Amino acid sequence: MKEVMLAFLGSYCPAILFNIERKNLVWAGLCGAAGWTAYKLVIDLSGSGIFAVFIAALVISFLSEFMAKIFKTPATVFYIPSLFPIVPGISAYYTVLNIINGKITEAAYVGLETVASAGAIAFGILVMTTIFKYINTRAMYKKGQ
């Protein structure tokens, strides 16, 4: 529960810094908390951090696209601050630290994991955004007929 609340704050506070409208702040925080919950559930079940990040990015992107439709706001308003809790910042730090300390093998391992996690985030957003765009295009096409 503590981690979910911290994930909420970890999404809510960047949303304030990005000057997001007041009515969307709580929703951005909830989106980040849901993403963190998905991350923790998947990592506990599978043990794969990269897969967990991918699933969390899918959840965050789905909720962001859904809330964007409801609130008539761009989805980036929700998913940019919501991604903060799952961004692999500490592993990027350890990559640089291992390079400085001359531990090249460890740096390569952690660096590869960092890049893979970042790619998983990007791919998760890409997949869900593409699905929503396809659904919207189909709906608009059917309205036109």
Image (tube, rainbow, N blue to C red):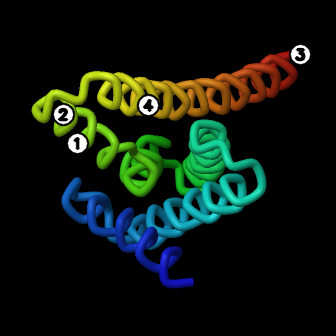
Instruction: Say which of marks 3 and 1 sits in front.
Output: 1
Name the amino acid type tagged 2.
Val
**What residue sits right under mark 3 in the picture?**
145
Q: Quadrant of the N terminus?
A: bottom right
Which amino acid does the dot numbered 1 rest on? Tyr
Which-is-in-front pick, marks 4 and 1?
1
Q: Residue at x 34, y 23 (%)?
A: 105
Q: CA distance from mark 4 to mark 2?
A: 16 Å
**Marks 4 and 3: CB-CB under 8 Å?**
no
Callout 3: SS:
loop
Look at label 4 and name its amino acid.
Ala
Residue 138 found in image quarter: top right
Q: Residue at x 49, y 83 (%)?
A: 2
Query: Dot 2 lies on which element?
Result: helix
Quadrant showing the C terminus = top right
Residue 137, placed above or below residue 6: above
Q: Which residue is mark 2?
A: 96
Q: In this image, 19 relative to 87: left or right? A: left
Relative to 75, residue 13 above or below:
below
Residue 83 horizontal/vertical position (percent)? 43, 49
Looking at the image, tell me whether mark 4 or mark 2 is earlier in sequence order.
2
**Can you tell which of label 4 and label 2 is closer to the viewer?**
2
Residue wearing tag 4: 118
Do the residues bearing badges 3 and 1 touch, measured as CB atoms within 8 Å?
A: no
Going 61% across and 29% down the picture, which residue do you hit? 129
- Mark 1, residue position: 93
Disc 3 to disc 1, how far (Cα)?
54 Å
Q: Residue at x 35, y 66 (%)?
A: 10
Q: Residue 88 sits in which quadrant? A: top left
Give the structural element (helix, strand or loop) at label 1.
helix
* Image location of residue 3, percent across then percent down: 49, 75
- Of the numbered discs 3 and 1, the one sitting upstream in the chain is 1
